Amino acid sequence: MKKLALSDEILLTIDKPARYIGNEVNMVVKDKEKVDIRFCMCFPDVYEVGMSHLGIQILYDMFNQREDTYCERVYSPWTDLDKIMREKNIPLFALESQDPIKDFDFLGITLQYEMCYTNILQILDLSGIPIYAKDRTDEDPIIIGGGPCSYNPEPIADFFDMFYIGEGETVYDQVLDAYKENKAAGGSRADYLKRVAQIEGIYVPAFYDVTYKEDGTIASMTPNNEFAKDKVKKQIVMNVSDTYYPRKPLVPYIKSIQDRVVLEIQRGCIRGCRFCQAGMLYRPTRQRDVDYLKDLAKDMIESTGHEEISLSSLSSSDYDKLQELVYYLIDEFKKNGVNISLPSLRIDAFALDVMSKVQDIKKSSLTFAPEAGSQRLRDVINKGLSEEVILKGAMDAFLAGWNKVKLYFMLGLPTETMEDIEGIATISDKIAREYYTIPKEERNGKAQITASTSFFVPKPFTPFQWSRMVTREEFGEKQRFLNGKMKEQLNYKSIRYNWHDAEVTILEGIFARGDRKIAKSIYDAYQKGCIYDAWSEYFNYKTWMEVFEENGVDIAFYTSRERSEDEIFPWDFIDIGVTKKFLRKEYEHAIEETVTPNCKMSCSGCGAAAFQGGICFEAHTDNGNINC
């Protein structure tokens, strides 16, 4: 048995030692002496969160299929172990071999959420790897970032050697092959970065110079290396039924956030909600073959022993073979006690039938995400959901035996008025009223409506990337106003109102649209003890405000400022297929309260057809000729 990096004495003093000992079901074990490349995959949050992430499982499986590569894992040590590692000078280690991260060739960090940025510095620091890329030598691992936040990597660009823009299944083999060739030829770290800068989808921040105007906006971003491209193109896999997917995913010995088999049924979304970054980034929509999914589900249940299957996608109701797949999963697995976890479906007869088969109606609740309280604002954000549909869905569910409804909204959306906010209270009340039209003897107890609001953050590559974001004070005013309106409703005793903290939202807003000038503040906040900012018990707003002030960062510049049409954004060097021209047109449509049809109804010419596949071709071709 391999020697653990932590002694028994330490493991007995920390919370959940299983986070650090590895050896989980389906863990890959290789002889590290017989591989050319050692890659450590990192999720910069606690183990239970990281183990629930599908992307890591896909890449772990894909890398380990290469005979020349051994992929291992590391997660952020929780605060109790963090303290001990610093006191005893214990280097951070990978779960599989328990070897120090510093001994690896690559450390790949997935960037899922902006509030994990200080955890990235924790990982580097505890590993003994210089935090700034410019300070690293040939002895240090190559630090590579990927995932949704890499679509604006600039606030953390100084900490990374390179970023992978796009889906991992496409050019990672080229990235690893180039490393092997460079190593065999005796090439240096600098030589390798020049090689990978030539691969589509790879961004090496050190190869670009950024200049700023007097007002703080970007004047130019230009390559300073002959191998760096002017535009970095997003890489995507077009055939999602003939690619990597873990048939034997890792199973932890402690409960993770999502303790189940995850079936990703499609990528992308046809809906075009104007606030949704994922909906634009992952275009075009690509569906997995239904037989492929059935086969996967069988293998994954057998190899993991999980008792639940969950379908994953941005908009599951739009998957063409959803009924066939869901009824198959129910027939095949329900008899063996395997639960089917339903994605967020549009509420219709099919959804209610399925839910009544797989859920205990007395315990479960239905979820609607109207996002905005009024039809006017739902049209602004292109939600494609009318009040009639919401009320009918709720009423159908009530008649079928449900009495609990969850509603999700955002506060601070562009063009929002107090009437729109009041609409959140009004529609919550209308749903409760629908319930009470049912004769008392036919009701399932009292209606329970839970309305939750989060605060809107404008994200890069969305039509709202030009929008101002509401200030912390304005968020507070809107939330208090809504809370008051909730209490004025006739059925307010049936309505529960939850809201999120505005302080974290402000930080998200700065990081989401930030530039390279933000990096020093992230570094300073980390030095002052900020880690696990995504966890409310550790988030320290005061410290963040201090470091922004010390570094001259104007919060309003990054958040509550309307951008001009011709402003150069920090992420403009990335080409996601969807064009800036289309996004601007959508922004103007939002202001005009004009709805854009979804991709199945008609092509709006967003630019994603450049990838020559997915719905752009399936739904809009005529004899092979694209009509967009």
Image (cartoon, rainbow, N blue to C red):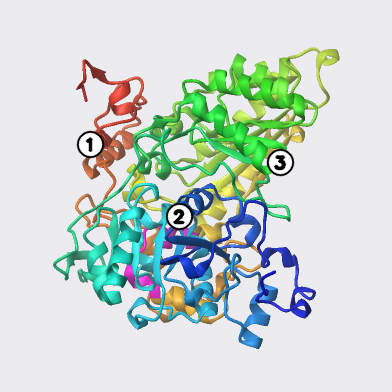
Q: Is residue 515 magenta?
A: yes
Q: Residue at point 36% right, 44% down? A: 281
Q: Amino acid at mark 1?
A: Ala
Of tags 3 and 1, the one toward the viewer is 3
Marking on residue 610? 1
Gap in Å between the C-alphas at discs 3 and 2? 24 Å
Q: Note whether residue 385 is visible.
A: no
CB within 8 Å, label 3 to label 2: no
SS class, disc 1: helix
Q: Main secondary structure of the magenta part?
A: helix
Q: Nearer the viewer, residue 70 or 368?
A: 70
Residue 156 % position (x, y): 39, 68
SS class, disc 2: helix
Gap in Å between the C-alphas at discs 2 and 1? 28 Å
Quadrant holding the C terminus? top left
Residue 431 % position (x, y): 65, 25
Residue 603, compared with residue 380, is above or below; it is above
Question: Local crowd at mark 1 within 10 Å, few (<14), some, or many (≥20)?
Answer: few
In this view, the residue farthest toward the front is 34
Q: Is residue 374 left or right of residue 592?
A: right
Q: Where does label 3 land, which residue?
A: 305
Q: Where does label 2 land, which residue?
A: 63
Gap in Å between the C-alphas at discs 3 and 1? 41 Å
Q: Is residue 290 left or right of residue 537?
A: left
Q: Which residues are magenta?
A: 506-519
Q: Is residue 235 left or right of residue 532?
A: left
Residue 50 % position (x, y): 59, 56
Q: Amino acid at mark 3?
A: Gly
Residue 254 % position (x, y): 73, 56
